[in-house]
Structures are given as C-alpha cells and as structure tokens.
Amino acid sequence: MKITPLAGRINVNVSVLREYLDFMVHQNLIEREKITKTRVSYMVTQRGITVLRYFHELEDVLSGLKSMESLPLPINKHLRKRGEFEDS
C-alpha cells in the first residue's frame, strides 16, 4: 500500500505518518527495506512485537481498573485505602 492511501485510511497527514515511521525505525520497532528506487517496505521487528504486546497488556489492566470504578462504593473505598485503586 502506498503511503498516501495508508495515511488516509488511518486518518493521519502524510508528513505526520512519515515522522511516525521514522521514529519507529529509530526505536527499532520497525525496519525499512528499500525495494526499488521509489518503493519502500516496512516490517515489524521482534522488539516492535514485544512493545505491542506490552501495550495490549497495559490496555487490559487499565480497562480492568476502569471497571472497578463502577463497584459499589464501600468496595471502591476499601480498595482506595489499600492503595489498589487510585483516582486518575
């Protein structure tokens, strides 16, 4: 997929997308491979896969904490006293 349709698909400006891609290359999250003079391919590195896994785990934890806010008030207070749940 070319960069312009990709940028449109994910609703990001092309120049911003290029910056994101450069950042991820420099962080060793993706690799850039030149296919031809005008074509480039990006692949996720092992480190990139690991970072994605951590983000998904963090998302699960945060959604669990969010659901704790709806617990009945006495349980919610008890968890806050023990430091297991804090307001954001």
Image: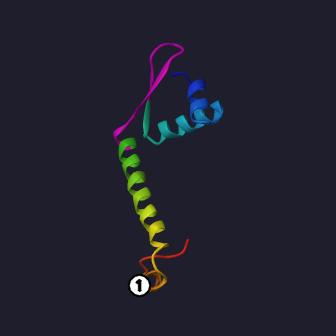
Q: Does the magenta segment cover residue 40?
A: yes
* Corner quadrant of residue 65: bottom left
Can you give x and y, in whole percent of width and height, for residue 12 in the image? 62, 36
Can you give x and y, in whole percent of width and height, for residue 35 in the image? 45, 16
Task: Say if 74 sits above or below 67 in the image.
Answer: below
Q: Which residue is mark 1?
A: 82
Task: Say if 39 sits above or below 16 in the image.
Answer: above
Characterize the local packing of mark 1: few (<14), some (14-19) or many (20 or more) Cα atoms within 10 angstroms. few
Q: Residue at x 63, y 30 (%)?
A: 14
Q: Residue at x 40, y 52 (%)?
A: 56
Can you give x and y, in whole percent of width and height, for residue 60 in the image? 40, 58
Can you give x and y, in whole percent of width and height, for residue 24 in the image? 49, 39
Seen from the viewer's position, the closer of residues 44 and 4 is 4
Horizontal side of residue 26 vs 13, given as left or right: left
How many marks the image carries: the answer is: 1
* Corner quadrant of residue 11: top right
| Magenta residue span | 32-47
Horizontal side of residue 2 vs 46, given as left or right: right
Indicate the colouring scheme: rainbow
Q: Residue placed farthest to the front in the image?
A: 72
Which quarter of the rendered picture does the C terminus lie within? bottom right
Q: Residue at x 45, y 61 (%)?
A: 63
SS class, disc 1: loop
Q: Does the magenta segment cover residue 55?
A: no
Three-letter residue code for mark 1:
Arg
Task: Say if 2 sits above or below 20 in the image.
Answer: above
Q: Residue at x 38, y 56 (%)?
A: 57
Horizontal side of residue 18 vs 41, given as left or right: right
